[in-house]
Amino acid sequence: MSSLMPLNIAVVTVSDTRTVETDKSGAVLVERLEGAGHQLYAKTIVKDDISSLRSEVSALIADTKVQAILLTGGTGFTARDNTVAAISPLLDTPIEGFGELFRQLSYEEIGSSTIQSRAFAGMVNGAIVFCVPGSPGACATAWDKIISEQLDSRHKPCNFTDKLRKV
């Protein structure tokens, strides 16, 4: 079997209240991606407003060394959940199956409450963007059951690594 092609991955926590010390969701994603053999390229916490989110993610999209961006938080239905509004317009190609599969898997864990998740993903400028809810459990589900395989160059029959920019 071929070896893993490590990717440069940025993690963005979307929150008005989290700090480096209290960001458990971001920590789950960092732990998982590093454990899988990928490189943490950047880790930030961004306020949950459209301008701040677009600015942060646009800079990551423009950085030719970033191959994947994982956002956690801001995907619910409160007035301060702005990830969908901020990030969706930036995507060149939505990956509809990601949100569908995430909600299916999440249903097995939390039941019908999963309908309040607006998890989504897409491709833009040679990078892939995954947006997941802000709970550590949701981050673990998304990484363990979907993202890890789709960012693993060895996963068959297909994965996204051959569609990402080369660094």
Image (tube, helix red, strand yellow):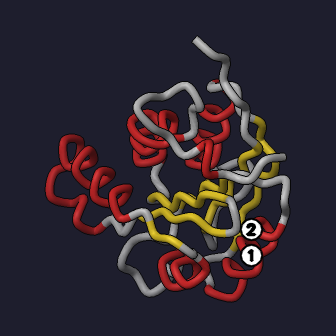
**Mark 2–mark 1 contact, CB under 8 Å?**
yes
Residue at left offset 66%, top offset 51%: 164
Instruction: Give SS at disc 2.
Output: helix
Task: Identify which residue is drawn at 61% across, 54% down.
Answer: 70
- 41 and 109: which is toward the camera: 41
Q: In the picture provided, is 89 more to the left or to the right than 165?
A: left
Q: For the N terminus, give its image quadrant.
A: top right
Residue on which the image places disc 2: 61
Q: Residues within 10 Å of mark 2 (few under 14, many from 20)?
A: many
Q: Is residue 117 above or below residue 85?
A: above
Find residue 111 and report its horizontal and vertical position in percent: 16, 51
Residue receiving disc 1: 58
Amino acid found under the numbered disc labelled 1: Ser
State the CA–CA distance, disc 2 to disc 1: 5 Å
Q: Nearer the viewer, residue 47 or 1?
A: 1
In the shown orientation, is residue 97 left or right of residue 43? Answer: left
- Check disc 1: other Cα within 10 Å, few if <14, some if 14-19, many if 20+: some
Quadrant position of residue 161: top right
Taking the image as shown, residue 157 lies to the left or right of residue 50, namely left
| SS for callout 1 | helix
Residue placed most toward the observer, 24 or 86 = 86
Residue closest to the eye, 92 or 82: 92
Q: Quadrant of residue 48?
A: bottom right
Q: Residue at x 24, y 59 (%)?
A: 114
- Number of numbered discs visible in the structure rendering: 2
The residue that appears at 62% across and 26% down in the rendered structure is 36
